Image (tube, rainbow, N blue to C red):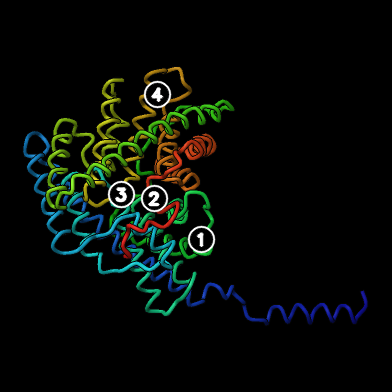
Amino acid sequence: MTEFSRRRKWIGLRNQINAPLKLNPFVFTKQFFMWASLGIVGGIVAGLYWLLINLLMKFFGQFSAGWEVILIMGGGGLIIGLIIHFVSEPGEMDLVVNNVRFNGGRLETRHNPSMIVTSALGIGVGSSAGPEAPMVQVIGSIGSWMAKKLHLKGEDYRSMTIAGMATGFTSMFGAPLGGSLFALEIMHHKHVVEYYQALIPAFVASGTSYIIYIIISKLSLAPVWFINVHHTPQVLDFFWGMFYGVIGALIGWGTIWVFKNFKKGFKKMHLPIYIQTTLAGVLLGILGWKLPITRFFSHYQLQDLLAGTFAIKALIIIIVIKIISMSLTVTSGWRGGFIIPLFFIGAATGMLTYQIHPGMQSLALAIVCCMAAVNSCVTRTPISTILLVATMTGYSQFIPIMFASLTGFFLAPKSPLISAQVGKDKNLLKA
């Protein structure tokens, strides 16, 4: 090496050392801090909401031994109906999807007080609807409000709303990755990456909110439901996954059929909303009294189901009653989501399938695959469902779950449960 080359090399090395450290400028953009701020606000809202509904469930859960359950749930339905009738219409998931897809992501915060009160009361007294849908609407509308105040337009506006929705899913599921993808995937029944521009905003907001939510709620980072896995992965697991996917799809078809018929039935009755919610509350109270494991939205009851020993007849009854109670809750005007109840139905289906033929691979495999297939069939979210089921159960073998989830998705009926996934629902008012 010549003296000139040596000196040139040393000068280059010195310049590299003296040059300031350059970080990715993306980290310090206004957008990043917007998404993180939304996550902080969303985490606080979700954390406080979780504490509220847990307090209510603990209080009303004491009344489960007799006829007082009917009185409590009927009274809860009356109050919910009166709030909707005299105060404000809280909104629903169809409306949220409709506005994100066809109204530029614009959601109004004026529905939030009614949604929080009615959904928390319904969940607290024991309805079969979960907290994920209320939080999706509430935090999604907060994201929309922030976008409006920051004068965002086009896809930037929509992305903030979707990031808020992802925050709601993440908090209630305890799964940042799965919750983020679920918010994007539930928008459309086929094109899972239609709003790919919202992916990074959703990840940032969800990750931030998850930290805040865990601190406030004092929940652990462990899986929500623990499933004992005593099974060595085998090639046949893929085929078993598809088999369980078919079983889960059949249950999904039945769930959608019951849901749609209940919805048509309430429309034909033309009852005032407070009469409708009260009637549904009385019926839910009777079902919850006779079969307590089907009461509430199944966050805790699913673990009780997994820990119990049930005969075939008992599992069939549990599945049928849970489908009825979930459909009755959502279609009658009570507010809440149906994802976690669907996981409960899927888990019971897996246990039933294994009970009928105990020689089938493993109980754990049957449970997680049926959970994925039922949810994927009903909600049309095959990709995020894989991540949600694996994360929430701690089942580390993704591939059989993937086969089951995709099977449930491809065998789903043409008409989805959420009508706005296909096209604009003109019957929905703008939120």
Bin the neighbour count of mark 3 within 10 Å (Cα to Cα): few under 14, some 14-19, many 20 and up. Answer: many
Q: Marks 1 and 4, Cα distance to the nearest angstrom?
A: 37 Å
- Labelled pair 3, 4 in contact (Cβ < 8 Å): no
Label 4 secondary element: helix
**Nearer the camera: disc 1 or disc 4:** 1
Closer to the eye: label 1 or 2: 2
Say which residue appears at 10% left-offset and 45% top-offset.
74
- The residue tagged 4 is 353
Residue holding disc 2: 419
Residue drawn at 29 percent across, 25 percent down: 315
Q: Which residue is mark 3?
A: 337
Q: Secondary structure at mark 2?
A: helix
From the viewer's perspective, is the residue at label 4 or at label 2 nearer? 2
Residue holding disc 1: 195
Q: Foreground: 413 or 113?
A: 413
The disc label shown at residue 334, or none: none
Above or below — where is 247 with respect to 295?
Answer: above
Q: Nearer the viewer, residue 2 or 413?
A: 413
Quick check: marks 2 and 3 in contact, CB under 8 Å? no
Crowding around mark 2 (Cα neighbors within 10 Å: few <14, some 14 to 19, many 20+) is some
The residue nearer to you, when weighing 159 against 324, is 324
Q: CA distance from mark 1 to mark 3?
A: 22 Å
